[in-house]
Amino acid sequence: MLTIKQITEDTDKAVRALEKKHFKHAKEAIAEVIRLNDKRKAAQAQLDNNLAEINATSKSIGALMKEGKTAEADAAKAAVAKIKEANKALEEAKATAFNEMQTLLYAIPNLPYDEVPEGETAADNVVVKMGGMETELPKNALPHWELAKKYDLIDFDLGVKITGAGFPVYKGKGARLQRALINFFLDEARNAGYTEIMPPTVVNAASGYGTGQLPDKEGQMYHCEVDDLYLIPTAEVPVTNIYRDVILDEKDLPVKNCAYTQCFRREAGSYGKDVRGLNRLHEFSKVELVRIDKPEHSKQSHKEMLDHVEGLLQKLELPYRILRLCGGDMSFTSAICYDFEVYSEAQKRWLEVSSVSNFDTYQANRLKCRYRNADKKIELCHTLNGSALALPRIVAALLENNQTPEGIRIPKALVPYCGFEMID
């Protein structure tokens, strides 16, 4: 969540930034945060004054008793008792203002960086780079759901039988391709200096609040109501929460973690051709990168993560493009975000396969994730994460873009992991 310093240091700038994200009633929300914070501070100031008065009066009581001024001592005791009673109301007022302010701050999104473009929807995102290999497909090229059926790689109907739509069953070489991609992505991450984590795939509400999935995306998460636990939408949630209520040493930054997990998303409201096959699933595999860094180095960390994801797509020989998201299309928690999309030649459309974000101090403030700098001062960290990569649409593009009359060609980088060069 936003810090009070971000809001009060330049209130007009904060409001303009929130308006770039198309956050409704930004001015009113910021004004209310300031009002509640002023109310909290006023109550605290009065409490401090009262405590000083209590201390001074209490010291005088002993002296009055020694001097035999019993009546005056009793009056002083009564005055102290009255102040302590007033303090109860002040403590309650302070706590109420703080809790209301915190609740409001949870509902206010992160401030986008200045370089985030203006815009409302995905149509306003800016393509910053295109790359990869052009593909030439045979006539009557098939979409991946038809290829999966033809080569018995993925059974969508069986997934419906077992669970429901959006839960495919991978079979034979389809399952081996999944495992190959997971191992390839993890090996590439470890070679780049990331420490592998195997976290739980269910988290408590505190973890959801820590990374910003709650309360913003509550309706998109699967909730185990009896135990009040949530299935994770991404490994970002458990891995970043490792550092909740932790103070790191500056010398240990940046922290670099990677994790493979299953991910679960309700995808409520999704329908139509864009959800066919692997395009949009309720359960899928993903390798996630998470970094914890100091503020002055986080932009460099973000660049390194972008370069890493681009390198994966180049090794997979896929046509790709990188987009800088506009304010209206960014996530609730991001300060800046780049999406990677691969081109599906058979579907004639771009498929998002990764989002790489810098959250500035927004998540760290929720998490109380801090570091001790060289001057022994405690400061908030910056958090970053990105998919490297999400499997379903990578698999879709690999199947579609590599189909030949003889079968589906496996990119050279994956052959050692698959154990085969063709799906036929």
Image: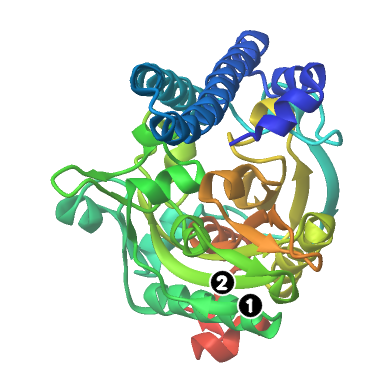
Crowding near pointer 2: few (<14 within 10 Å), some, many (20+)?
Answer: many
Confirm whether residue 306 shows in the render: yes
Horizontal and vertical percent for residue 237? 46, 55
Confirm whether residue 216 shows in the render: no
Position of 409 relative to 238 (above/below)? below
Residue at position x 65%, y 71% from top? Answer: 255
Q: Which residue is mark 2?
A: 258
Q: Which residue is mark 1?
A: 194
Crowding near pointer 1: few (<14 within 10 Å), some, many (20+)?
Answer: some
Amino acid marked by disc 2: Cys
Is residue 355 shown left or right of residue 310? left
Is residue 50 shown left or right of residue 87? right
Position of 350 relative to 379 (above/below)? above
Is residue 331 shown left or right of residue 169? right
Sequence-wise, the earlier of marks 1 and 2 is 1
Q: Tell me, yes or no, whether the two marked residues, 1 and 2, touch with CB atoms within 8 Å.
A: yes
Q: Quadrant of residue 381?
A: bottom right
* Label 1 secondary element: loop
Residue at position x 54%, y 22% from top? Answer: 40
Horizontal and vertical percent for residue 166? 33, 48
Q: Quadrant of the N terminus?
A: top right
- Which one is nearer the viewer's eye here, 252 or 311? 252
